[in-house]
Structures are given as structure tokens and as C-alpha cells.
Amino acid sequence: MKAIIIYESTHHGNTKKLVQAIAAKYHVETASIEGAESIDLSSYDRIGLASGIAFGKFYKRMEKFAEKIPAGARVFLLYTCGNPAGGYVKSITRTLEANGAKVVGNYGCKGYDTYGPFKLVGGIAKGHPTEEEIARAVEFYSKIRGKE
Ligand SMILES: Cc1cc2nc3c(=O)[nH]c(=O)nc-3n(C[C@H](O)[C@H](O)[C@H](O)COP(=O)(O)O)c2cc1C
């Protein structure tokens, strides 16, 4: 079982907290999206894509990176967002599935958000992800890591 999580967590490092907690418990490689293009993903049984949300989608660079995921790959998605309105995995899932990858699950939770006008009020989702939300991400991974 070989697994890797590629992450983009530029706003406050919120999503990276989920990634680090999973990697602390399970044997999972992690890599920032910078330079991830050079990784040969064909040898991994699980590929995680982890990102903050911007304008209703995974960050632009991650949405683009998803186009390069090989057909037949088993992918899971992790994200944090200021307002968990839902629908945030739709676009990237569509891209992955159009290229023949399979999305085996996704986990998302709130992440501290100081974008734009929220900055003026001290941000939203302060204190997120919480320890509990991080633990749930680890639990999510424990469930999907063996799923076909
Ligand atoms: C430019 C920008 C756009 C954002 N757009 C959304 C959005 O559409 N919906 C949402 O819930 N959060 C949005 N957020 C909040 C982030 O998704 C949230 O703070 C996330 O936890 C950041 O993750 P990171 O620290 O791992 O980068 C936005 C943040 C930024 C900086």
C-alpha cells in the first residue's frame, strides 16, 4: 500500500494540518504542489489531493494538477473552507473522473478564513480546523485507505 498526499495550503496552513495528522499516524508520503509535477504518480495505490477552497473550488493550481492524475488512479480529496456550503469537490471530481481516475472519498471541514471583507471582522471559522476536525480527517483516511 503506497500512498501520497499532494497539498496546497497557502492561506493559513489549515489544510496542511489535516495532511500532517494523517502522515503522523499512517505511512503516507506528502508533497507540496510546488514541484509535484515531477513525481511519478503511477506507482501509488492512493493519491490524496488536499487544498483550501477559493471561489467554490479547490485552489486553481490543484484543479489544474488534477488533470495530470493517471487513469485508473484511486484518489481521495481533502479540503478546508471558510464556509462549508458544500459542492466544493464537484469540479475537481469531474476532472478526475473524466480522465478515468476514481474518487474513493472526500473529507472537508472549516478552516480559518481572512479573505477579503472577512479580514475586517477578524476572519471567520477562527480556531478551525479544531483538534476534533483534524482527528476526523485521520479517521476518514483510515476508512478509505483500503477501499477499492
Ligand atoms: C482567495 C480566497 C478565496 C476563498 N474562497 C472561499 C470560498 O469560496 N468558500 C469558502 O468556504 N472559503 C473560501 N476561502 C477560505 C479558505 O478556503 C479557507 O480559509 C481554507 O481553510 C484555507 O486553507 P489553507 O490555509 O489550507 O490554504 C477563500 C480564501 C481565499 C484566500
Image (cartoon, rainbow, N blue to C red):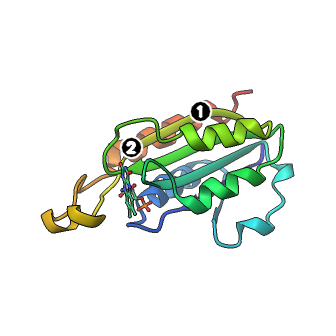
For disc 2, the marked residue is: 109
Residue 52 percent coordinates (x, y): 46, 56
Vertical position of residue 146 compared to residue 62: above or below: above
Residue 52 vs residue 4, the one in the foreground: 52
Question: Where ligand 1 lies, by quadrant?
Answer: bottom left
Vertical position of residue 66 compared to residue 1: above or below: below
> In the rendered image, which quarter is residue 97 located in?
top right
Disc 2/disc 1 C-alpha distance (Å): 14 Å
Residue 137 percent coordinates (x, y): 47, 42
Residue at 41 percent across and 47 percent down: it is: 134
Residue at 59 percent across and 33 percent down: it is: 105
Mark 1 residue's CB less than 8 Å from ligand 1: no
Residue 142 vs residue 5, the one in the foreground: 5
Question: Residue 88 has which mark?
Answer: none
Q: What residue type is labelled 1?
A: Gly
Mark 2 residue's CB less than 8 Å from ligand 1: no
For residue 136, side relative to residue 36 (left or right): left
For residue 117, side relative to residue 132 (left or right): left
Q: How crowded is mark 1: few (under 14 residues within 10 Å), some or many (20 or more)?
A: some
Q: Is mark 2 on a helix, strand or loop?
A: strand
Q: What residue type is labelled 2?
A: Cys
For disc 1, the marked residue is: 105
Residue at 76 percent across and 66 percent down: it is: 37
